[in-house]
Image (cartoon, rainbow, N blue to C red):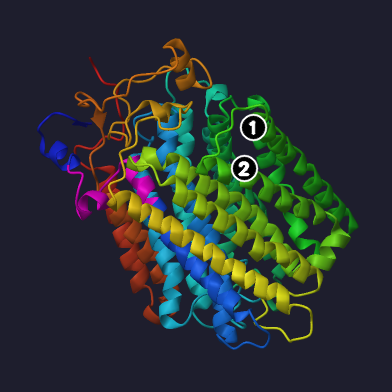
Amino acid sequence: MATTVLGHETPAAAAHSDKYGLWSWITTVDHKRIGILYGTSAFIFFLIGGIEALIIRAQLFSPNSHLVSPDFYNQLFTMHGTTMIFLGVMPLSAMFFNFMIPLQIGARDVAFPRLNAFSYWVFLFGGLLLNAGFLVNAAPNQGWFGYANLTSRQYSPGLNVDFWLFGLQILGVASLAAAVNFFVTILNLRATGMKLMRMPMFVWMSFITQVLLLLAFPVITVALIFLMFDRFFGTHFYIPSGGGDPILWQHLFWIFGHPEVYILVLPAFGIISEVLPVFSRKPLFGYAAMVFSGVFIAFVGFGVWSHHMFATGMGPIADTFFALATMLIAIPTGVKIFNWIGTVWGGSIQYRVPMLFALAFIGMFVIGGLSGVMHSVAPHDLQQTDTYFVVAHFHYVLFGGSIFALTAGAYYWWPKMFGRLLDEKLGKVHFWLMFIGFNLTFFPMHFVGLYGMPRRVYTYHAGLGFDIWNQMETVGAFTIMAAFLVFLYNIFRTHTGGAPKAPADPWNGATLEWSIPSPPPEWNFQDEPAVHSRDPLWETKRERGGTVPEPTPGTGHGIHIPPPSYWPLVTAVGVLGLNLGLMFSPRTGPWGIAVGVSVLFFGLYQWLFEKGYSEFTTPAHH
């Protein structure tokens, strides 16, 4: 099959070299652009989820408040949880998967560029469908966990659950497509000499995450298909009156849901493991132990799901097994924390903004992990389940963990992605506002939870001891909002205020992405790199007396890269159309399904037999 060769004046090459305009973004298969699309979309969804959280906190600022109605409050907390997990943290991690994995392993592209573009468009359509319920006052309102029987037609007769059901099914397609792509990319496209035990730690944690995605998402897909059959075709998988079992949903959901926690956190572990060595000026401590602890976390993570279900009455044997497994998984996590501290210990520490967020991550994640170990004790868990103590726990893990690490990664890799350094002073203002606001918001939830305040309550009466804590939490939430406004201003000022261009290696980095210009050329590497150690760029600098010359982009002549394609977008429209057809089939009959299937198969056919397209890249010839 033909490929586009940069430097040759062909129509395909001309189209491929068009780096500007909306159409170039719609048809792009460049992993770096797709990463930027993922990051931009996810950050917008993240801000939407943050607005939902602010409304929740405003409602709970004072007792007996009526800022929003009870039904809208249910929609808010359902969509806040769903948005932050599936539309915020996961795709923000996918931004770094897309942009950084090929650069860190010395590849010119991902294994399947069009599949990569397809995964983005499917993700975007799934996120839009999830939020479309707000337009018709029918946003999901059953809780982000979707417990049966709250999701049955009897208790949720409207479209609310349907938006959630089909939105998540679409997002599952996107996640599985991306996981296949990065799994193959990491295994097959590493540079010469980059053995598995020489891969950067971010690549290792990303690889383990792809395995978790491939194993966990089919489970939630099966659970959602069962739910779809119950709601649309009269089956009784979760309905007791027909012989079904509501607890089956909980088992299926949490078999997915607890590995999902590590899908959210393992990329954060990888980012922190990249930032700490660079700003400590020493290699990562205990590399092999970090790798094997990540693998162990993924393995044991599939055996702890029922600690979410201690209150369902599983019995002492099951409770004992899952309590012990939950305690056991704290060991590899503790190994990672020990090694991060060992990396910093004795180093020449530079307190730049990425380092501040990385160090804060360690402290916040330890607090969240300690309360998690507390919940491994079944009697303890029975007292605290469905209280704000649990809310405090998972926010310390997912916000204090994932969001702090993703923010560290954003400041760390921003110059590589966009060619400019974010302002250091504004970054530190962002850090301190976020650090103070986060702790002011979520640490008091431990106390209000121990006092007995349930989760997901619309309001509360005065005199219960909840007032002052909720007021502190609301002030903290708006402080977090101020922090992200500073971040947005920093981005705006950096790219409109004439900030100087970033060099290729502004941090004295150790990995391959810092050996090429910022931002990288379309073909990434002019020559395929050869790797001889775990820190290849540091090794090169030592060999050359501590510095390397600033790389030049080059012409890319003779490098084959895949041309643009709009068929992934058409195929993604077909996936959306199929799900919309199923969703509205009680009103439209089979016609909507038929249209969606037709578009889907038309897009797939054109995708498979697209003329002049090759997914494969070849080395430059000199």
Q: Give the alpha-carbon distance from disc 1 to disc 2, as whole Å.
A: 9 Å
Viewer-nearest residue: 273 or 501:
501
Q: Quadrant of the C terminus?
A: top left
Query: Where in the figure is residue 59, as x and y percent of width and height?
Result: 59, 81
> Is residue 28 magenta-colored?
yes
Q: Is residue 482 above or below residue 550?
A: below
| Residue linked to disc 1 | 344
Q: Specify the segment rendered in magenta.
A: 18-38
Query: Which residue is rendered at x = 68% and y = 34% of the image?
Result: 341
Query: Where in the figure is residue 546, as x and y percent of width and height?
Result: 45, 16
- Asked if residue 178 can be seen in this view, the reply is no
Viewer-nearest residue: 539 or 308:
539
When asked about the image quadrant of residue 236, the answer is bottom right
> Is residue 304 magenta-colored?
no
Query: Which residue is rendered at x = 20% and y = 53% of the image?
Result: 23
Element under label 2?
helix
| Residue linked to disc 2 | 359
**Few, some or many residues within 10 Å of mark 1 (<14, 14–19, 20+):** many
Q: Are marks 1 and 2 in contact (CB under 8 Å)?
A: yes
Query: Where in the figure is residue 560, as x and y percent of width and height?
Result: 24, 28
Which amino acid, mark 2?
A: Leu
Assign the magenta stretch its main secondary structure: helix
Which amino acid, mark 1?
A: Val
Viewer-nearest residue: 154 or 242:
154
Disc number placed over residue 228 in the picture, else none: none
